[in-house]
Image (tube, helix red, strand yellow):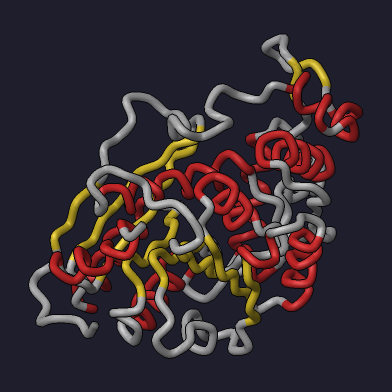
């Protein structure tokens, strides 16, 4: 099924929430139930302490506390056992990762008469799966989707493989592939004729190591820590996880350029963009690439505003033909 002659892309933006908050299907939308989390994962208890508002919380400036919370959330909400990441690797907040997955489900549902396609026939490609593997874990548990996770870091993939091995059934649903070329995104990991319903990615945000360090200092101050203390990345992250040439906008533009080489193999390409300033550059690149449709979907977690951009090279008739396999018994 090759791409048809291209028309100017339709550009739409998803509905904005009335107030900052997580997706309504997000299991964490009601906040953290620390009593249930500690019951499911007693190792969290030493990190729980009274918060200024009077309820229980953790010190979100403490990387070990954040890791313990993630481990408890994944166990209590998704039944994931043995979750861990090596020291220094990215340990992202589970609720925000789950939100991206739920909005992706809505993206597919909008192309499927409002029904979310479920089951292993729905295939997703996680670009930069990392040591934490959170997107595939949540996506498979929530919707039964199958995943291919790629990364350039062999140690990260080894960590991800340990998590899968600790949970029977996941190794068949989530496949890990090493990207041997640090400069490539899809080339070398997407096989000829291989098809994906979705790609997802949380690209490195910063454009240099210096920017990453300055970002850590700002976050440290926002968490109420003094300037005399050395900033610690509470959510971790190694160099390639935090910065790349051109930052997130540069990474997204390279992803767009590579997506033109496999236009008929993916229904929806997507990538997170943390900064709204990246949008104009990304949209211009997509129009130049000949995307048939471009969507920007806003997301929010508390006061943090984010969004992802989705694009497809398939026209309406091609997308309808693609969807037929979801409807097959």
Whole-percent x, y for residue 281 in the image: 30, 66
Direction front: furthest residue: 329
On the picture, is 60 further left or further right than 285? right
Q: Residue furthest top?
A: 54
Q: Is residue 162 visible?
A: yes
Quadrant position of the C terminus in the picture? bottom left
Q: Quadrant of residue 94?
A: top right
State the image coordinates of residue 52 (x, y, percent, origin top left).
71, 14
Please indicate whether residue 240 sits to the left or right of residue 66 in the image.
left
Q: Nearer the viewer, residue 173 or 259?
A: 173
Identify which residue is drawn at 38% across, 52% down: 117
Residue 280 is situated, as x and y percent measured from the top left of the image, at 27, 61
Label count reads 0
**Quadrant into which the N terminus falls:** bottom left
The residue positioned 54% from the left and 42% from the top of the image is: 96
67 versus 208 height, above or below: above
Report whether residue 227 is seen.
Answer: no
The residue lying at 35 percent from left, 43 percent from top is 298
Q: Is residue 85 above or below residue 197?
A: above
Tell me where residue 55 appears, x and y as whole percent. 72, 13
Q: Residue at x 78, y 31 (%)?
A: 59
Q: Nearer the viewer, residue 23 or 274?
A: 23
Q: Quadrant of residue 164?
A: bottom right
Rendered position, 279 above or below 141: below
């Amino acid at each position: 099924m090759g791409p048809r002659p291209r028309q100017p892309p339709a550009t739409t933006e998803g509905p904005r929430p009335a107030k900052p908050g997580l997706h309504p299907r997000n299991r964490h939308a009601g906040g953290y139930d620390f009593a249930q989390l500690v019951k499911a994962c007693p190792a969290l208890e030493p990190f729980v302490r009274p918060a200024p508002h009077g309820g229980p919380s953790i010190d979100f400036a403490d990387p070990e506390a954040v890791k313990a919370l993630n481990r408890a959330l994944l166990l209590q909400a998704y039944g994931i056992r043995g979750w861990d990441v090596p020291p220094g690797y990215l340990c992202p907040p589970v609720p925000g990762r789950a939100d991206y997955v739920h909005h992706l489900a809505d993206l597919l549902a909008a192309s499927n008469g409002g029904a979310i396609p479920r089951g292993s026939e729905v295939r997703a490609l996680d670009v930069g799966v990392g040591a934490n593997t959170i997107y595939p874990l949540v996506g498979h548990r929530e919707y039964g989707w199958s995943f291919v996770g790629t990364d350039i870091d062999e140690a990260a993939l080894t960590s991800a493989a340990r998590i899968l091995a600790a949970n029977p059934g996941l190794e068949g649903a989530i496949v890990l592939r090493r990207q041997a070329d640090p400069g490539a995104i899809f080339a070398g990991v997407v096989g000829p004729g291989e098809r994906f319903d979705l790609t997802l990615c949380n690209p490195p945000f910063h454009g240099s190591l210096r920017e990453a360090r300055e970002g850590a200092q700002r976050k440290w101050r926002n968490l109420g820590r003094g300037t005399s203390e050395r900033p610690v990345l509470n959510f971790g992250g190694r160099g390639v996880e935090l910065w790349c040439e051109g930052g997130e906008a540069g990474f997204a533009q390279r992803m767009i350029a590579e997506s033109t080489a496999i236009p008929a193999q993916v229904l929806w390409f997507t990538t997170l963009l943390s900064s709204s300033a990246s949008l104009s550059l990304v949209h211009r690149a997509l129009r130049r690439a000949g995307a048939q449709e471009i969507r920007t979907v806003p997301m929010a977690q508390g006061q943090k505003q984010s969004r992802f951009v989705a694009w497809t090279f398939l026209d309406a008739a091609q997308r309808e033909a693609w969807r037929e396999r979801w409807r097959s018994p």
